[in-house]
Image: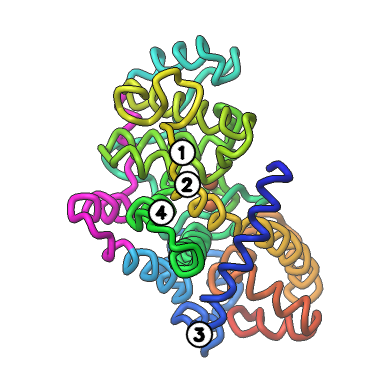
Amino acid sequence: MNTLSRRNFLHGSALIGVSVAAAAMTPMAAVAAGPKNCRSVKEVFSMSDVDMAKNSEVVQSAYDTIVNVAKKINNSSLRSSILSILENPAPSIAEGNEAGILSSLKKEKLIASDAKAIFPRIQNKKQSPQPFWSAPGSGYGSHHAYPGGLATHTALNVVSAQALYENYRHINNLDLDWDDAVGGEILHDLHKPWVFQWEKNHACRVEQTLAGTGEHHVLSVAESIKRGIKPSLVVAQACAHEHPSSKQGEALVVGWLKAASIIAGVDPVKSGLLAADQKTLPLPRRMEGYVVHLADHDWVISSSACQWSVQALKDLAKEQYGITDETQFNAFRNYVLANLTAMRLYGILSSQGRKAFAADVARVIKL
Ligand SMILES: [Fe+2]
Ligand SMILES: [Fe+2]
């Protein structure tokens, strides 16, 4: 993330604030604060990570938020494609010839020369290894690292994208494409359920790097291409991790679109994903990608909030629940965060202290 991205983010976050401040408490925030089903530690240890997300009202409400926004996509065939990805983000790109894709990526220097594979494990290529709503929001040491974290991350991003779209319209008279900006945000992390599969110890699979970024990004862009999502939305989606305002930044986005095109088996120029010289995005550069990029910046606060909440949970688990085993702690942590979220808990810890933090945890789990 370069300085320019950060500067733009700060400007964007000020704009986001206008709409969020005017909004009432969302159903997701209300259920996080509302009465809870308090389970015993023993009961939690026997739950799967998918069960934890399934039983969390907060996670299900976050997922509903995303689906309800997806239902507002204007173009009907795009709307049904996006809804079907949310329903089952199956990796149709895994049907491709992995050895051929790997050698093309190596030829373009988009993957390490000693890379052995490109696709995470998958049993049935027609079925996502887990629902969209049970995946973590990122790697286990990063943001939203708990069952349902992808839903809570994407919900905030999608609401932010809508607010940014409106704010740019009201303040700058911009007439952006709503489907590209908001649809791109909905799809931006679509392959996290595949990349971040839950492991037996309740941590998740470790992500590999692809074309200089986390593989989930390139695989998600490739999936959108493969499923026939329109190129202007795919380009906007590709900007989630970087924007094209600097040469360096644009080269990264171009590399992701090239790698994704190789994986999806398309020509990026003929498909309208890159300019004819393959050095830039299609010109003039559209602005919807900036909305996707800025609205994905939830990770800035949420990565630290998750790490600091996990550390505080580790201390609490040891002191008050007698949990020191790593797998047991992971289950404890996943259950608590799926029901309360790392953002809410760190908000309580940072403003009210450890006692209030422990009291909120005690609403959902007991000895
Ligand atoms: Fe991402
Ligand atoms: Fe994201």
Pointer 2 or 3: first along the chain: 3
Q: Which mark is residue 285?
A: 1
**Farthest front residue in view:** 173
* Spot occupied by residue 278 in the image (x, y as percentages of width and height): 45, 20
Distance from Cα at disc 2 to Cα at disc 3 = 28 Å
Distance from Cα at disc 3 to Cα at disc 1 = 36 Å
Mark 1 neighbour density, 10 Å: few (under 14) some (14–19) many (20 or more): some
Residue 48 shows in this picture: no
> Which of the two discs, 4 and 1, sits closer to the camera?
1
Amino acid marked by disc 1? Arg
Distance from Cα at disc 4 to Cα at disc 1 = 14 Å
Pointer 3 or 1: first along the chain: 3
Amino acid marked by disc 3? Met
Please give the count of numbered marks on the rendered protein.
Answer: 4
Image height check: is 114 above or below 95?
Answer: above
* Spot occupied by residue 315 in the image (x, y as percentages of width and height): 80, 68
Image height check: is 241 above or below 209?
Answer: below
Mark 2 neighbour density, 10 Å: few (under 14) some (14–19) many (20 or more): many
User: Which residue matches tag 2?
Assistant: 289
Image point (35%, 58%), residue name: 178
* Spot occupied by residue 287 in the image (x, y as percentages of width and height): 46, 48
Amino acid marked by disc 4? Ala
Magenta-drawn stretch contains 266:
no
Residue 119 position by quadrant: top left
Secondary structure, mark 4, is: helix
User: Which residue matches tag 3?
Assistant: 25
Image point (39%, 20%), residue name: 276
